């Protein structure tokens, strides 16, 4: 792979949370670029098959179900970890806090460790998903914020641990993207104003805006990039 090779054509890619807003956009972008995609998600498989995407029901808290889904490919080139949910206002309940951390942080770790043997031969790229709450506090989502901060550190640690296997581990930290996860925040006039007043674009962005950076991190063009979390946030974290 050359450092000017931006192609992901021919790759086998597994996307967790692959039927959500950002996961779907990333899955579609990989398919458009010539990759094969397995999308795993706890939500039901769509009635009409999605072109180029194999949809499977699996839970990142049960990595054996993810391994079964991944086994549809002989080996994996790229894993993108988009599974997640937040529970604003409920995460001070220790059980909910634990559930949220389980999905985002423990889930990302377990999926990476479970699927690593499938990646060992081809090397490959793991792309985790952080958040602006990897960096900034939020009074409403202590579990989500703790998990997303942990993902930055997990990304560094796995990158160091697996560099010798030729596996790169990076993350993207999306800004404010229009999906089901942010729908209530966007619809709340007070929260919306607090967020958009800090956004240089002045607007929430679309899930497709995250895909280009993810494809770059999966391509040879990023072959020297590992252990980093790239904000894809329209300048939110710069302000
Ligand atoms: N939307 C944003 O502005 C934003 C910002 C920063 C980070 N993120 C992160 O991006 C990722 C995708 O979020 P989104 O905005 O597309 O939300 P979304 O709700 O549209 O998608 C999340 C998907 O994850 C799936 N999921 C939930 N729990 C799961 C589990 N245990 N196993 C497998 N799948 C599971 C859901 O069914 C859903 O399809 C999440 O990690 C989220 O924290 C989103």
Image (cartoon, rainbow, N blue to C red):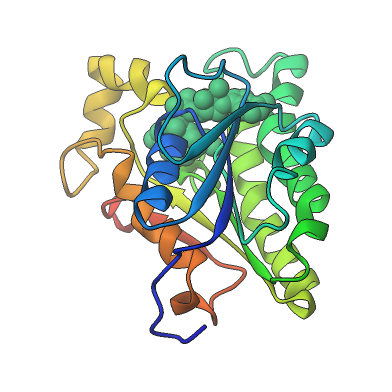
List x then y, in percent, for residue 42.
Answer: 63, 21
Vertical comparison of 77 with 145: above or below: below
Is residue 43 or residue 233 the one in the foreground?
43
Vertical comparison of 42 with 73: above or below: above
The residue shown at (25%, 25%) is 192
List x then y, in percent, for residue 201.
Answer: 16, 46
207 vs 122, left or right, is: left
Of the 4 image quadrants, the one containing the C terminus is: bottom left
173 vs 148, left or right, is: left
Q: Is residue 85 visible?
A: no
State the count of labels.
0
List x then y, in percent, for residue 173.
Answer: 46, 50
Residue 85 image-quadrant placement: top right
The residue shown at (81%, 52%) is 113
Vertical comparison of 176 with 181: above or below: below
List x then y, in percent, for residue 193.
Answer: 21, 27
């Amino acid at each position: 792979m050359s450092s000017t090779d931006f192609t992901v054509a021919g790759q086998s890619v597994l996307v967790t949370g692959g039927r959500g807003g950002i996961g779907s956009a990333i899955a579609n972008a990989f398919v458009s670029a010539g990759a094969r995609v397995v999308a795993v998600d706890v939500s039901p498989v769509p009635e009409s098959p999605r072109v180029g995407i194999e949809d499977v029901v699996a839970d990142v808290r049960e990595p054996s179900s993810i391994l079964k889904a991944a086994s549809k490919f002989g080996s994996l080139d790229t894993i993108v970890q988009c599974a997640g949910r937040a529970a604003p206002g409920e995460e001070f309940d220790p059980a909910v806090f634990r559930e949220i951390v389980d999905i985002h942080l423990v889930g990302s770790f377990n999926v990476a460790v479970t699927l690593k043997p499938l990646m060992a031969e081809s090397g490959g790229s793991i792309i985790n998903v952080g958040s602006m709450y990897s960096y900034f506090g939020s009074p409403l989502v202590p579990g989500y914020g703790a998990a997303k901060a942990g993902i930055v550190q997990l990304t560094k640690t796995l990158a160091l641990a697996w560099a010798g296997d030729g596996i790169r581990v990076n993350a993207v930290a999306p800004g404010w993207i229009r999906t089901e996860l942010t729908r209530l925040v966007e619809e709340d006039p007070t929260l919306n104003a607090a967020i958009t007043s800090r956004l240089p674009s002045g607007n929430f962005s679309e899930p497709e805006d995250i895909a280009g950076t993810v494809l770059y991190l999966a391509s040879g063009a990023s072959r020297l990039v590992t252990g980093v979390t790239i904000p894809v946030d329209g300048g939110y974290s710069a302000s």
